[in-house]
Image: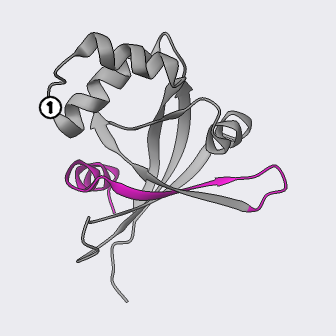
Amino acid sequence: MEIEKGLDYVRDNSRAVLATRRRDGSPQMSPVTLGVVDDTVVMSTRETAVKVWNLRREPTAWLCVFPDKWLGRWVQLQCRTEVVSLPEALDYLVDYYRTLSGEHPDWDDYKRAMSEDKRCIVRFHIEAAGPDIQG
């Protein structure tokens, strides 16, 4: 599958399971919500989350993206990641929210909540996408 097709799939399907590697090499998986901002897959999470620790140590991740109702096709993406921390993450967090939910009724309150929650943004740079066939 072409990377652009994988990116288009995420534009229409925000549910995914993220897989990272623990220090011992075993998988650590988390359900996540994705968005696409400036042609990059992004996710909001807490700076203190295990997935962030794993990605800071080894920036390779896999996403299994699927429809909300689990009907139809799914896509797996292999990605190189970039963790963006506050305060730089704040503009990305606003764009992420807008992509998924539109305008917030109180952006100052939203930004304060993101800072208090120690949120960060993970940017996923797709290196491979698939499958192209169904079994």
For residue 95: magenta?
Answer: no
For residue 8: magenta?
Answer: yes
Residue at the extreme bottom of the image, as rendered: 135
User: Is the residue 83 above or below the residue 129 in the image?
Assistant: above
> Quadrant location of the C terminus?
bottom left
From the image, tell me which residue sits under label 1.
102
The foreground one among 106 and 33 is 106
The foreground one among 81 and 30 is 30
Q: Residue at x 27, y 24 (%)?
A: 95
Residue at the extreme right of the image, as rendered: 24
Residue 38 visible in this rendered orientation of the protein: no
State left or right for residue 32 relative to residue 110.
right
Residue 96 visible in this rendered orientation of the protein: yes
The foreground one among 75 and 23 is 23
Q: Residue at x 32, y 56 (%)?
A: 2
State left or right for residue 69 relative to residue 87.
left
User: Is the residue 1 above or below the residue 53 in the image?
Assistant: below
> Quadrant location of the N terminus?
bottom left
Question: Where residue 86 sits: x, y (%)?
Answer: 52, 14
Q: Which residues are magenta?
A: 1-26
